[in-house]
Image (spheres, helix red, strand yellow):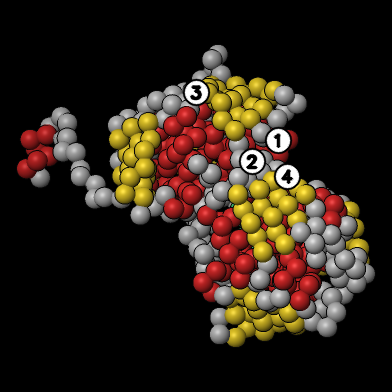
Amino acid sequence: MDMYVIQGGQPLRGTVTISGSKNACLPLMCAALLAKTPTVLENVPDLRDIRSMKSVLEHMNVRAEFANGRMTIDPAGFDTPWVPYELMSQMRASMYAFGPMIARLDRASVSKPGGCNIGSRPIDLHLKGFRALGVHMNERGGYIHAVHDGLMGAEMSLAGPFGPSVGATCNILMAATLAEGRTVIHDAAREPEIVELGEFLIAMGARISGLGSSTLVIDGVKTLNGVNWTVMPDRIEAATFATAALLTHGDIVMKNVTAAHMGATLSELLRWGAEITLLDEERTIRVRRCPSRDPEPLDLTTGPYPQLATDVQALFVTLLGLTPGTSRVEEGIYQDRFMHVEELNRLGANIRQKGNRAIIRGVERYDGAPVMASDLRAGAALTLAALAAHGESQVRRIYHVERGYEHFERKLAALGANIRREKQRDAVPAFDVGEGGEESREA
Ligand code: UD1
């Protein structure tokens, strides 16, 4: 297992190109199976999750070739309507295969996804939507088995206890494109990745209206065709580099972004005290600390788009940990998504968590320490905290980070970070008791 070894304290400066969006690309790879002809995706990030989805496609006898950011998907052989536990347990987004299997092969069996490190992640809304389309389902041996004798358009709501579901909206949207008649999805998720999927499906020949709103109307068609498509930029990766600039007192220019997708993130960073310059028709963003004012604490709540994304919560907590004053962050999507808090406290942060809230009292500095990534975004946030900390840190379990950040340490190093990758080894504590050391040594 590898870790990052980081000497903190270098301001990150320079230009970074943001990769294609993982969360947009995963459903597009599955949507390609709705056609009978090949699809070519460009700007595909080289990530563990993308390779896991490629394995899901290959398991279903779909040919997928991936090199230099281009993936060609040929669904001619698509004939296997199930996803085994081994693949499902690697990545929950394998659930995106369900919609295309149901629509093209009239049946689907998937291993039930379990919980994960950010808490309970049910799939009841996916199943509710498929039932509404006329799919019969039962659960046996840890698998969900589904079958139908004709997908019928239907009206449904995909509202859950924490708002709409991105995954369920994508899955039903895909299946409904080939259903008979009209499907209306109320309380649909509105994330840019869903708009991207909808536009991709329209390019394939689907009839969809309402993209970007919470009501989607889909009129089923008989067949769809493969297309050439360039995957949209990753708004969460862009938020990560923006936060890195602010945490390290640096100055970063991000290329290949879509500023319009980052509204809530950018406006909170502005409130905090960032200087943000949009260039090149808002496809390039420069971020640094505003030279004329001090950063301010924030009260934030994450929620469904267009609210602040849960995927940037750990980044904001890390930034606010070094912001004078008291900040409050409420997690509105995943109640338990605070695994990074204890790790940040190991770096010297003063954060108290109660339920789905964190109260953050800003400290002057973080001090390097060994920390452990518990999930993708927590791992990215801890890496940034280590870059801002005094001294050496080791960020362990970086395989989580590599699920979602393409060439992360290479991009950070190009911006001036002192970061290297090593095999994980035992941490040797530095024995420094500071003032009153003799007493402490006795104890
Ligand atoms: C997607 C993103 C993830 C992001 C999340 C929320 C991908 C691959 N992943 O995950 O990065 O953090 O959106 O923006 O794009 N829920 C139910 N029942 C369901 C489904 C979800 O109650 O059937 C709940 C979830 O527990 C959660 C909320 O709804 O509280 C939102 O989940 P959802 O939008 O489905 O997340 P994902 O699509 O899994």
Marks 3 and 4, the one that precedes in the sequence: 3
Residue 25, label in figure: none
Dot 3 falls on a residue whose secondary structure is strand
Name the residue tied to disc 4. Answer: 230
Dot 1 falls on a residue whose secondary structure is loop
Side of 361 where 100 appears, left or right: right
Q: What whole-number distance in Å separates the C-alpha atoms at marks 4 and 1? A: 13 Å
Q: What whole-number distance in Å separates the C-alpha atoms at marks 1 and 3? A: 21 Å
Quarter of the picture containing the C terminus is: top left
Marks 2 and 1, the one that precedes in the sequence: 2
Crowdedness near tag 4: few (<14), some (14–19) or many (≥20) residues, C-alpha within 10 Å: some
Instruction: Give amino acid for label 2.
Output: Arg
- Contact, CB < 8 Å: mark 3 with mark 4? no
Marks 4 and 1, the one that precedes in the sequence: 4
Dot 2 falls on a residue whose secondary structure is helix
Q: Is 1 rendered above or below residue 443? A: below
Q: What whole-number distance in Å separates the C-alpha atoms at marks 2 and 3? A: 20 Å
Q: What whole-number distance in Å separates the C-alpha atoms at marks 2 and 4? A: 15 Å
- Contact, CB < 8 Å: mark 2 with mark 1? yes
Marks 2 and 4, the one that precedes in the sequence: 4
Name the residue tied to disc 1. Answer: 258
Residue 235, label in figure: 2
Residue 173 in view: no
Side of 367 where 100 appears, left or right: right
Residue 281 in view: yes
Instruction: Give amino acid for label 3.
Output: Arg
Name the residue tied to disc 3. Answer: 13
